[in-house]
Structures are given as C-alpha cells and as structure tokens.
Amino acid sequence: MLARCLKTVKAAGHCFCRVVISLNGDLSGEDKSIVVSELGSCQNILVLETPHTLNPVAHLAWIADQLHDTPRTQRVLLLAHDDELEADAVLDWCNSLEERPRNLAWIGPYRVVFNETHTAVISSAPSSSLYPLMPPQEWLRKYSPTPRCTVFTNMSGMSVELGVLTHVMRYCQRTHGRKGLRFEVMLLTHASVEGVVEHVRPLAVIHEHAGQEGKNVLRSDWYSDEIRCSIWLLGNATGVGNFLRMLLGPWGMRHICGSAARFIREACFTALMGHNRKWR
C-alpha cells in the first residue's frame, strides 16, 4: 500500500515545495526502505521517524511539532499511507490557489475504492467550480446537520493551513484523544477558516478496507471523540448567534450529555465483562 501511495506522490511531487513522510513505529525500518526505493531521487523529501509507535492523534501532533520551522500559514495537503494522489488534479488545484482567499479548508470530492472491487465519487461540499466558498458553520448545518447524518469525509486530499492542523491536534492531545474520529470536521470548523470549498475534481483516491484504522474503533473512543468534537464546535463558533445555535442544536449540549451517558455505560460494560466492544 505504501509503495502504491508513494508512486502517486512522486508523480505529483513537483507541485509541492516539500513532501513530508512520517514513518510510525516498529515497521519504520521496512517502510524507510520502500521510501528510498520509490523516492530516493527526489530532492524535496523530508522523512521523519517516530521514536516509538504513536496513536493517530499523537502521530499527527508529533508531525506538526517537527515542522516548527515552517510558517503556520503554510498550506498542507494530507494523505494517508494507503491512499493515492491524482497528479493532474493536484497540479490544476495548485495553479488555482492564487485566485482564492488564503485560509480556506479544502475537502473532497473523493474517488473511493471499496474493498478493491468497486469505485464511487463522493462529494463532501459544494463544488468550487459552481459555488462560492461556504462559511464553516453553514457547511456544518448543510452537510453534517446532526452527528448521525454526516457526509463522507477523509483526511486524504484535505488541505488547510499548518496552523489549523497544529491547533486541532494540540486540542485533541490536551483532551486525551487517541483516534481523532471527528478530525476532519474540526479542521473544517476552525475559527480562523474563512470558508469550506471542494476541489473541482478528486485529488485523492481513498481505499476503504476492513483493516484500516477507522474500521477498528472501540466504542469508548467513538463516544469520547463525539464529546470532544462538540466541545470544539462550541469553542470555535463565531459570534453569539452561532454559539447559541450550536449549543441548542443537534451537536450541542443534548449530544454531549447523550455521548457522555453512552461512554459511562460502555465503561461499565468493560468493567463487568472484561473486554472492550468495537464500534463497527
């Protein structure tokens, strides 16, 4: 999977001032040999290796910390190791950035491959070729109106300023998050983001499969991340009106209390039965 991903990164590498690859954990030596094999001739590559295996939140926060010498306003494009970039689409997108406000959050559409058998293109926001940018709170109301009614999101192909990524990851770390299950929603709704907009065409090919991190989540992690995201949304609501709508709406206090009750119930089940249950 990593070799397949890196081939597409190499094809699009000329679009970026720097490509940062972070190798996480015990397999980093094996992964590094793949990186050298696929990208050894590239000049703009920075390879990072974590000191030990980190959970998803700690890993992204660690990467952000390693880039301390990079301006916080520098735009980053995210990609998971088992997904792919569409080089032509990336080039077209990079060429269009000067025409756009600086601090936008870009997301989707995604070309999603399900279990390597069938493919679909899934939208997550209004197309940048048809609509103006959408304020984050409006995106949330239209595209993720309730915690149980959300559009498909994935970090691969998403782009925000480095400062936004750093702030989100530090918040997740301070609140003891591990999985970052609402990570994309928090990136899109950061208070500094001027608008949410979708790429004209997919920048990333997402490979959905049973072994990926998001398919193997404990219920306790899911419920705690639900609470974490709702508190984030309240803290990043711009203006009194948006704050009150968030507080009283589906993502607000009612959801926080419900998720807390489910978290406590799951903790009691774990204590009694001696094992954790998975969300899916």
Image (cartoon, grey):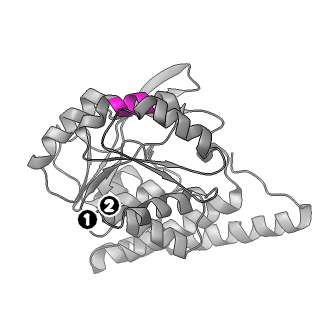
In this picture, residue 61 sits left or right of residue 128: right
Circle 1 sits on which residue? 71
Amino acid type of disc 2?
Answer: Leu
Q: CA distance from mark 2 to mark 1?
A: 8 Å
Residue drawn at x 55%, y 30% as measured from the top left: 1
Question: The magenta stretch spans which residues?
Answer: 6-10
Residue drawn at x 76%, y 64% as measured from the top left: 266
The disc placed on residue 250 is none
In this picture, residue 118 sits left or right of residue 141: right
Q: Position of residue 264 (x, y in %)?
A: 73, 71
Q: Position of residue 251 (x, y in %)?
A: 47, 66
9 w.r.t. 169: above or below: above
93 w.r.t. 277: above or below: above
Near-viewer residue (141 or 263): 263
Q: Position of residue 136 (x, y in %)?
A: 29, 60
Q: Quadrant of residue 234?
A: bottom left
CB within 8 Å, label 2 to label 1: yes
Circle 2 sits on which residue? 162
